[in-house]
Amino acid sequence: MKLIENWFSERYSDNLQLSFRVSDQLLSVRTDFQRIDVFETYDFGKLLSIDGTVQLTEKDEFVYHEMITRMPYLYSDRKPENALIIGGGDGGAAGELVKLGLKSIVNVEIDGQVVEVCRKHFPSLASSFSRKNVELIIGDGIKYAEKTDRKFDMIIIDSTDPVGPAEGLFNEDFYRNISRILSDGGVVVTQSGSPFYQPKAIGLAHKGMAPAFSFVRSYTAFIPTYPSGFWSFTMAKKTPIEMREETLDPGQYFNMEIARSSFSLPEFVKKLIA
Amino acid sequence: MKLIENWFSERYSDNLQLSFRVSDQLLSVRTDFQRIDVFETYDFGKLLSIDGTVQLTEKDEFVYHEMITRMPYLYSDRKPENALIIGGGDGGAAGELVKLGLKSIVNVEIDGQVVEVCRKHFPSLASSFSRKNVELIIGDGIKYAEKTDRKFDMIIIDSTDPVGPAEGLFNEDFYRNISRILSDGGVVVTQSGSPFYQPKAIGLAHKGMAPAFSFVRSYTAFIPTYPSGFWSFTMAKKTPIEMREETLDPGQYFNMEIARSSFSLPEFVKKLIA
């Protein structure tokens, strides 16, 4: 009988935590930007943590990655041909965009070590960076958006939460630059936190996006390993947010009913962005 | 500085647990049916646990109670006048039905001590049992459904999970009796567990209901203190499951958009009941 158990716990507050029993800690590294840990869990496969918060697990990453890519894909006025991902150093979002048939994907991740860690421990996700239509840039997404002359049909902000390195990804100046580099009829989406435990994040996203975009709407998804199990994403366009006539095959979470209904927000969430 | 912290943990499996820091344990009692505990938590107010699983907290009980009552209310062919609740010993479902204006509510709870505990520790919920249109019966809901001659417009199965005392509430014989005591055009709903951690529960509910009802559909809601944060309810009727022409005011979770969209199931949930 094993007398010592190893648990990784994410504290959602001083008073609440979700704990995963782990068989091994595969890596722990402090980079210039953040602390990265990888655990082998019993129930969720490998788990990537940044600054103590779960970024993804092998078992449930599909929800986040399907929902942050297929939703903007369908709500872009024209079928998107190229995309910019800011963050997303695990390669999961880029991989979904490859599956969606995009011709060109630029992925700007600030922390090269996230990419290295994921290449080693989450190869099924990070292998997308080896696709010839995916261009990986290690650099600051805020500066990239400020300086590039390229235009994108779809922009995905796949960042950590709005504290630490991702803070600037929620503000107005950033979204003015995003607006500048977005094609006509294009769409930008950002993860915008747990409406329950991070009630300010979704409001920050709206506040950051509203000055540069006429249409801003949030949608939600259920992600069991994220705080409260309930997550929000916020989408913005200069044209109305309406679904394009195209039917995508179901994923493991996503399907065409979810594509429509995930914009329906519980009343307490509506109040956070009223 | 306090060196000892007290935590109540619900184990979702041997390898995963959600923990609430508690300032006090207010009660612990073993009844003829189950073990009941009440904790004072820091983040969620008082918490009721049965057999180690969270039944409700003051802070998020509204999601469960709104969704298990307002959905069947709206999907009943006629405006329901009377209802049967099986389980629901906390009084939360009965309270919501009182708010919805039902004339007569029968609540059959098997464990009288659940009611006593909630009268003491959750008076804002259990006070519904003092309303003159609510009849509380301490007894076995399965036997009640077998023997009663009354008919109900709406039947709510607000039980614990399909292990232990609630096991018989998921089977075919029980639902044949429910069908017998349901008015024409009436609706029955049961909680049917977490599609993620209890993937069999939603299938059990469908299997139990299908022989006696022509129409069976599941809907979901986000409940942060239940396993995975994602919960299912399953509704059955002998007539098509269509919303009645009536607009309800929003609750804290429920609103008319949620009333429609909560039937949209993620693809992995659809597969559990295919």
Image (cartoon, coloured by chain):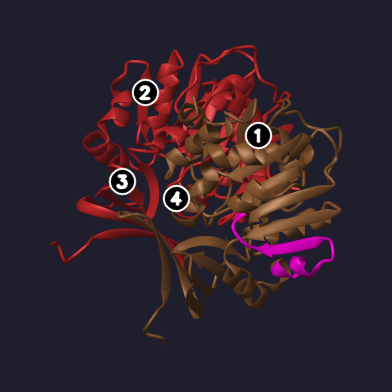
Chain colours: A brown, B red
Verify CB contact (< 8 Å) between mark 4 and mark 1.
no
Disc 1 from disc 2: Cα separation: 51 Å
Confirm whether the magenta stretch covers residue B238: no
Name the residue tied to disc 4.
B165
**Label 3: few (<14), some (14–19) or many (≥20) C-alpha neighbours in 10 Å:** some
Name the residue tied to disc 1.
A236
- Which kind of residue does numbered mark 1 sit on? Ala
Q: Earlier in the sequence, mark 3 or mark 4?
A: 3
Which residue is outermost to the bottom?
A1
- Which kind of residue does numbered mark 3 sit on? Asp
Disc 3 from disc 1: Cα separation: 33 Å
Residue B172: x and y in percent read: 64, 43
Residue B98, placed above or below residue B15: above
- Which kind of residue does numbered mark 4 sit on? Pro
Residue B73, placed above or below residue B226: above
Disc 3 from disc 4: Cα separation: 30 Å
Q: Is residue B211 visible?
A: no
Residue A7, placed above or below residue B67: below
Disc number for residue B43: 3
Q: Residue at x 27, y 35 (%)?
A: B122
Disc 4 from disc 1: Cα separation: 49 Å
Residue B206: x and y in percent read: 67, 43
| Region rendered in magenta | A126-141
Q: Earlier in the sequence, mark 2 or mark 3?
A: 3
State which chain disc 4 sits on.
Answer: B
Q: Nearer the viewer, mark 3 or mark 1?
A: 1
**Label 1: few (<14), some (14–19) or many (≥20) C-alpha neighbours in 10 Å:** many
Labels 2, 4: one chain: yes
- Which kind of residue does numbered mark 2 sit on? Glu
Q: Residue at x 35, y 38 (%)?
A: B59
